[in-house]
């Protein structure tokens, strides 16, 4: 039961994070024809409150802060899955599952750096990089789950 709960948290965090990244990418693509560029609009989106001020909520975070919370949830649940599933042995043994898992962990480390870049200076390139890394991780997850 614990394993299924951790998998659920992992998948929900990943899906919401991909949604946030795709939102940033769509905003960047929509603003590319703007006179001032996409950066001011992306900065406004990054600093926007979630949930919006019009809704009653006990806690508000910035949109980028939401991304960090989801990354933390995905990382913590992924680490828990490694421990619960014995995935660390797969990495040590090598082979296709081990290589896929090691690649996924490296991509996650790169994703943390890309998210840091998006937080520090929102730009279309940073938004596209985060989205690309998330989609690569999702693709590897599908291969590992087979």
Image: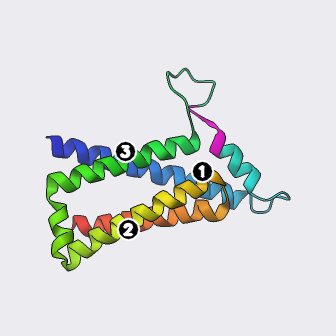
Q: Residue at the spot x=60%, y=62% of the render?
A: 126
Q: What mark, if any, has residue 78 been given in the picture?
A: none
Q: To which quarter of the image does residue 53 belong? A: top right
Q: Picture coordinates of residue 38 (x, y %)? A: 74, 57
Q: In the image, is 9 to the left or to the right of 54?
A: left
Q: Report the span colored magenta.
A: 46-51
Assign a secondary structure to mark 1.
Answer: helix
- For label 3, the residue is 73
What residue would you read off at disc 1? 119
Residue 13 falls within the magenta-colored stretch: no
Give left or right: position of 100 versus 110.
left
Tag 3 near tag 2, CB within 8 Å: no
Q: Are marks 1 and 3 in contact (CB under 8 Å)?
A: no
Q: Residue at x 66, y 45 (%)?
A: 45
Picture layout, residue 78 above or below residue 129: above
The Cα atoms of the two marked residues, 3 and 2, are separated by 17 Å
Provide the residue designation for mark 2: 106
Residue closest to the far bottom: 95
Q: Position of residue 106 (x, y in %)?
A: 38, 68
């Amino acid at each position: 039961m614990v394993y299924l709960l951790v998998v659920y948290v992992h998948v929900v965090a990943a899906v919401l994070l991909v949604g946030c990244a795709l939102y940033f990418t769509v905003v960047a693509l929509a603003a590319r024809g703007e006179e001032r560029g996409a950066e001011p609009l992306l900065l406004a989106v990054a600093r926007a409150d979630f949930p919006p001020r019009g809704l009653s909520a006990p806690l508000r975070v910035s949109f980028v802060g939401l991304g960090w919370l989801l990354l933390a949830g995905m990382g913590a649940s992924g680490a828990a899955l490694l421990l619960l599933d014995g995935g660390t042995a797969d990495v040590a043994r090598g082979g296709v599952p081990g290589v896929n898992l090691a690649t996924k962990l490296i991509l996650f480390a790169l994703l943390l750096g890309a998210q840091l870049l998006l937080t520090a200076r929102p730009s279309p390139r940073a938004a596209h990089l985060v989205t690309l890394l998330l989609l690569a991780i999702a693709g590897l997850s599908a291969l590992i789950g087979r």
